[in-house]
Image (spheres, rainbow, N blue to C red):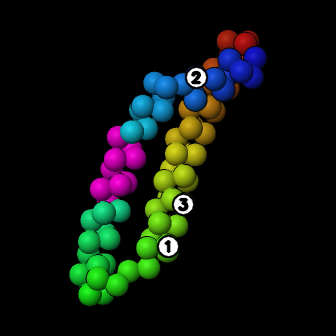
């Protein structure tokens, strides 16, 4: 039962759905990075910025996948699967 519930959350189609979200956050990241680079005369701690970007993206993806998983678990309970 668990595999049937979780499996679709990790399917290729589901991961492809996240592509637009990732592109959006990537664009925001690049825009912010350009702004910060201008403000600091090109000196930027990229480690800090990549950590921020990674944390934000992983958090968002976790929320999106978690919501889909919760929907599937609820549907499974309703349908008795």
Question: Range of the magenta residues?
Answer: 20-28
Query: Which picture quadrant has residue 21?
Result: top left
Residue 45: percent from the left, percent from the top?
44, 79
The answer to whether residue 15 is magenta is no
Residue identifier under label 3 = 55
Residue 47: which numbered mark, if any? 1
The residue positioned 52% from the left and 45% from the top of the image is: 61
Q: Which residue sits at x=30%, y=87%? A: 40
Of the two numbered discs 3 and 1 on the same chain, state the one appearing first in sequence: 1
Which mark lies nearer to you, 3 or 1? 1
Q: Earlier in the sequence, mark 2 or mark 3?
A: 2
> Does residue 69 appear anywhere in the picture?
yes
Nearest to viewer (mark 1 / mark 2): 1
Q: Does residue 14 appear left or right of residue 26 in this picture? A: right
Question: Helix, strand, or loop for circle 1?
Answer: helix
On the picture, is 24 further left or further right than 76?
left
Q: CA distance from mark 1 to mark 2?
A: 34 Å
- State the residue position of label 2: 8
Determine whether the residue tagged by mark 2 lies in a helix, strand or loop. helix
Give the answer, above or below, for where 40 lies relative to 62: below
Residue 27 shown in magenta: yes
Mark 1 vs mark 2: which is more N-terminal? 2
Q: Residues within 10 Å of mark 2 (few under 14, many from 20)?
A: some
What is the magenta segment's predominant secondary structure? helix
Quarter placement of the C terminus: top right
Residues packed near mark 3 inside 10 Å, few (<14), some (14 to 19) or many (20 plus): few
Q: Position of residue 35 (x, y in %)?
A: 26, 75
Q: Please, what secondary structure does the residue beneath circle 3 have?
A: helix
Near mark 1 (Cα within 10 A), the count class, few <14, some 14-19 or many ≥20, is few
Residue 74 appears anywhere in the view: no
Q: Disc 3 and disc 1: Cα gap in Å?
A: 12 Å
Kindly identify the residue that appears in the image at 75 percent across and 23 percent down.
Answer: 2
């Amino acid at each position: 039962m668990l595999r049937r519930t979780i499996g679709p959350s990790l399917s290729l189609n589901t991961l492809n759905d996240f592509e637009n979200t990732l592109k959006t956050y990537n664009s925001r990241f690049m825009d912010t990075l350009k702004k910060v680079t201008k403000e600091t005369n090109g000196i930027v701690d990229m480690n800090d910025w990549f950590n921020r970007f990674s944390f934000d993206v992983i958090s968002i993806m976790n929320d999106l996948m978690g919501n889909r998983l919760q929907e599937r678990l609820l549907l499974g309970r309703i349908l008795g699967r």
